[in-house]
């Protein structure tokens, strides 16, 4: 029996249902595999075409002269079983079945026939009714959209759209992902298989899960519990409300389960629970870049008094302590900062603050040692912000989290540098504070 690793590290791919028509899914899949830089041979399969995208095409899988590791399938459901049989005879190790028309519309028997055929040859299946897989370490984008940036977030999602959104955000910020996988109906390979793979994958630092229903029960729970001792896990599980549970059932015919029990399980094992897509991304981003926080005391340093107040409110609401500045630190700050600065927590460096002023204040706070982490808010175009944060970070173990807003083109440039250099930067104070809370929930 082959494994998920055999699929993700495939050395050759056949695309069945490949097309020269840009409106067809088979065109998109083939193009993304090719444009993504896949380094092995690619074999389009289409009975009516001689070549697609300049690549020689074959009428069927058995006509391909060389061995194939992986088959990506986008054809009508009724012929998928025959394709799997041909792939098995050709020695394929796995298949990604994009095609819908299986149990999600009541065709349970057809889905089981496909699975049983694959088992005869030891093949593994992702899908059917899925959006495919992008494993950036192998430059294998057998999905859409095309995302090439290699990063450290491993995403597995029943909803293709949600997973794709996370990887697109990560690429926009030049962080990238290690993997994006859309599971669809989960006839064979499930979240559990991916979690086990991510636990040992050197390219993955944090595991992101979007799950609607859990089919494997104890095996899933055991895998999550073991993996959370090695790497951070962030979970977005829709179906928290009565109507949400019904929506889950209609989407992929899954059982959402008892949300209170799942919440308690996450808390016990240090699994971070996200309530929406933005939190899923933010929590993955910060845990991929940061270490577990030991203390609950946060200092807010800002050039925007209003943004500092918002950060304070958010911290208070979610249980992060905004501790007062002690007299010794206050005296130090009085000696190095202009008179207009507000020496409290939040520490308001005021609207004319420069990167140099931030550097002086940061070093004073870090030397004092009263705070385990600092939220640094840049509320204006402040050139040199990255350089200062990067320098201070390299000289201290204190966790620095950044919120940068209102800075226009300067902000865009500075934030890009921060995210590329493992300094978590967020566009609003609220998102930064909530992300910081995630670091307090880690077990490792």
Image (cartoon, helix red, strand yellow):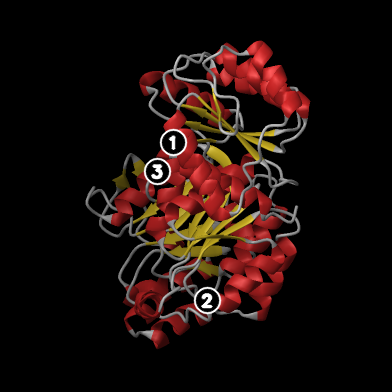
Residue 259's disc number: 2
Q: CA distance from mark 3 to mark 2?
A: 34 Å
Callout 2–callout 1 Cβ contact below 8 Å: no
Q: Position of residue 95 (x, y in %)?
A: 49, 64
Element under disc 3? loop
Q: Secondary structure at mark 2?
A: helix
State the image coordinates of residue 78 (x, y, percent, origin top left).
32, 77
Q: How many marks?
A: 3
Q: Which residue is mark 3?
A: 146
* Nearest to the observer: residue 119 or residue 101: 101
Alpha carbon distance from label 2 to label 1: 30 Å
Residue at point 44%, 19% (across, down): 351
Helix, strand or loop under label 1: loop
Depicted 374 relative to depicted 66: above or below: above
Instruction: Pick whichever of labels 2 and 1 is earlier in the sequence.
Output: 2
Above or below: residue 351 compared with residue 143: above
Residue 134 placement (x, y as % from top left): 49, 50
Looking at the rendered structure, which numbered label has been put on residue 235?
A: none
> Could you tell whether 346 is left or right of 35 in the image?
right
Front of the two marks 3 and 2: 2
* Residue at numbered disc 1: 427
Mark 3 neighbour class, 10 Å CA radius: few under 14, some 14 to 19, many 20 or more = many
């Amino acid at each position: 029996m082959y494994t998920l690793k055999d699929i993700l590290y495939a050395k050759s791919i056949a695309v069945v249902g490949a097309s020269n028509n840009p409106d067809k899914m088979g065109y998109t899949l083939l193009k993304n595999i090719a444009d993504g830089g896949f380094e092995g041979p690619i074999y389009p399969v289409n009975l009516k075409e001689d070549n697609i995208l300049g690549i020689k095409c074959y009428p069927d899988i058995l006509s391909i002269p060389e061995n194939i590791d992986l088959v990506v399938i986008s054809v009508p459901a009724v012929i998928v079983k025959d394709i799997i049989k041909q792939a098995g005879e050709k020695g394929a190790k796995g298949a990604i079945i994009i095609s819908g028309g299986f149990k999600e519309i009541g065709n349970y028997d057809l889905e089981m026939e496909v699975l049983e055929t694959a088992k005869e040859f030891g093949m593994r299946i992702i899908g059917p009714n899925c959006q495919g897989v992008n494993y950036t370490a192998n430059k294998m984008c057998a999905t859409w959209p095309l995302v090439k940036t290699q990063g450290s977030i491993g995403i597995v999602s029943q909803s293709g759209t949600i997973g794709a959104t996370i990887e697109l955000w990560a690429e926009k910020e030049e962080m990238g992902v290690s993997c994006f996988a859309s599971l669809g109906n989960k006839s064979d390979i499930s979240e559990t298989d991916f979690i086990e793979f991510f636990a040992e994958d050197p390219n993955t630092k944090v595991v992101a899960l979007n799950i609607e229903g859990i089919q494997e029960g104890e095996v899933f729970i055991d895998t999550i519990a073991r993996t959370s001792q090695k790497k951070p896990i962030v979970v977005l599980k829709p179906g928290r409300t009565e109507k949400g549970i019904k929506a889950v059932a209609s989407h992929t015919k899954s059982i959402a389960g008892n949300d209170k029990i799942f919440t308690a399980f996450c808390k016990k094992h240090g699994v971070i629970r996200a309530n929406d897509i933005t939190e899923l991304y933010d929590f993955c981003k910060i845990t991929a870049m940061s270490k577990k926080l030991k203390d609950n005391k946060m200092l807010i340093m800002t050039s925007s008094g209003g943004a500092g107040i918002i950060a304070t409110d958010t911290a208070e609401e979610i249980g992060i302590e905004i501790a007062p500045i002690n007299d010794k630190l206050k005296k130090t700050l009085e000696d190095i900062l202009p008179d207009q600065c507000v020496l409290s927590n939040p520490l308001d460096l005021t609207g004319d603050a420069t990167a140099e002023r931030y550097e002086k204040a940061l070093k004073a706070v870090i030397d004092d040692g009263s705070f385990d982490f600092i939220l640094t808010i840049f509320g204006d175009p402040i050139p040199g912000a990255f350089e200062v944060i990067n320098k201070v970070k390299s000289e201290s173990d204190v966790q620095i989290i950044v919120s940068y807003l209102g800075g226009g083109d300067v902000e865009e440039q500075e934030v890009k540098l921060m995210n590329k250099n493992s300094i978590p930067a967020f566009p609003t104070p609220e998102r930064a504070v909530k992300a910081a809370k995630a670091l307090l929930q880690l077990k490792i």
